[in-house]
Image: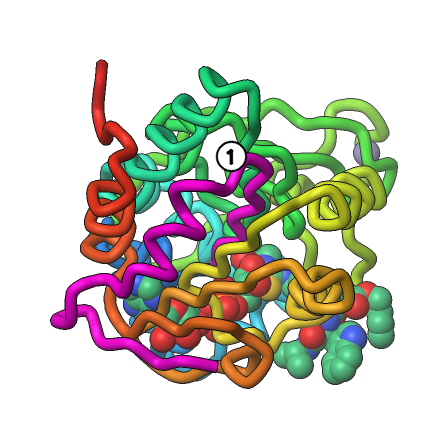
Amino acid sequence: MRELSVTESVPEDVVTLVREARQVVALSGAGMSAESGVPTFREVQRGLWERFSAEELATPDAFEADPALVWTWYRWRQALIAAVEPNPGHRALAAWQRHLADQGGWLAAVTQNVDDLHERAGTDVLAHLHGSITTHRCADCQEPVEVPDPAYDGFTVPPEPEQPPRCPACQEGLARPDVVWFSEMLPAEAFDAATAAIRASDLVIVVGTSGIVQPAASLPLLGLERGVPLIEINPEETGLTEVMDFAIRGRSGEVLPRLLAAAGIPLDRR
Ligand code: BV8
Ligand code: ZN
């Protein structure tokens, strides 16, 4: 594995890999949205939630124990995501996806993020492995629940928690976000699509993930088994660094545009 800093010019062999790839999988994590102002999972929670880690709040038990606290956390995060914009990293992936489509290839975006910043940058996302924060369902009957946009600005932490709405279908259950909580199974369709894409890929880019949360963190290993080149983009070492061919130490909003430019891939034609 070769570790490269963002200040260095992108080495020729990495540029060649990016230029010549035709079936690319980009696996993204919270770091992809950090430069947009979306806190990563490593960051401490604030206000109502300062006593909890994200891993503690993102569980069925936490929702069972205090539905209003967990519900408000998700509504506040949803408002924050709505208030921020995709960053140059998101837009670079969208440009790369368009470029490869024109070349008869493809870029499959597979994300652990529950935000919609990839889509808002113009990327067609193959799989939201951990669901989406913008849609909701009943915690009991699983029926979809329409919920109005949150009344928060996304920056001010709500002073007190709000109760989740009751499900209009079964009149019993409470609405919950369509995300995958810890100890819950991933959506099979999304996970299967991700594994199929990696099996068919000729390059895997792993962007902004600590490589801790399973089974998402095992996906790049499928590429390793098949000898697919693996490139990590992250300012820090991760749980996946040791299996990477290249680790570019830098922020995805800076590294991705530079990588594409070095490979002669047009960034923004819109
Ligand atoms: C399951 C949705 C079956 C909700 C999320 C095997 C071994 C050990 C444990 C397990 C195992 N198998 C299962 C488990 C349990 C668990 C797990 O993995 N626990 C971890 C903590 C050890 N997995 C599960 O529960 C999964 N379900 O396996 O079901 C089962 C059931 C019962 C028992 C066994 C099996 C479900 C996991 C999904 C949980 N839901 N999100 C929500 O968002 O609220 S996970 C959530 O956290 C995110 O979606 C994301 O996936 C994860 C955070 O990880 P990252 O995205 O990597 O982000 P992180 O903050 O950690 O790091 C940020 C990175 O970005 C850093 O590296 C940083 O350096 C970098 N960075 C920062 N700035 C930038 C940057 N990079 C680039 N540019 C920058 N500017
Ligand atoms: Zn219901």
Give me the residue at 38% from left, 33% from top. Answer: 96
112, above or below 22, in the image: below
Where residue 217 appears, as percent x and y from the top left, is: 65, 69
Q: Which residues are magenta?
A: 1-29
**From the viewer's perspective, is residue 198 above or below residue 104?**
below
Under mark 1, the amino acid is Thr
Q: Residue at x 87, y 36 (%)?
A: 141
The residue pinned by badge 1 equals: 134
For mark 1, does the 10 Å Cα neighbourhood hold few (<14), some (14 to 19), or many (20 or more) residues? many
Q: What is the number of callouts on the image?
A: 1
Observer-nearest residue: 206 or 175?
206
Relative horizontal placement of residue 181, taking residue 148 as reference (left or right): right
Residue 210: percent from the left, percent from the top?
49, 75
Q: Give the camera-side residue of 109 and 167.
A: 109
Q: Is residue 48 found inside the magenta-colored segment of the image?
A: no
Name the one closer to the observer, 224 or 249. Answer: 224
Image quarter of the C terminus:
top left
Q: State the colouring used for the structure image.
A: rainbow
Q: Is residue 15 above or below residue 147?
A: below
Q: 247 and 153: which one is in front?
A: 247
Residue found at x 55% / y 83%: 239
Relative to 152, 244 lies left or right: right
Left or right, 224 with respect to 40, comes to right
Identify the residue at horizontal 61%, vertical 37% (top origin). 165
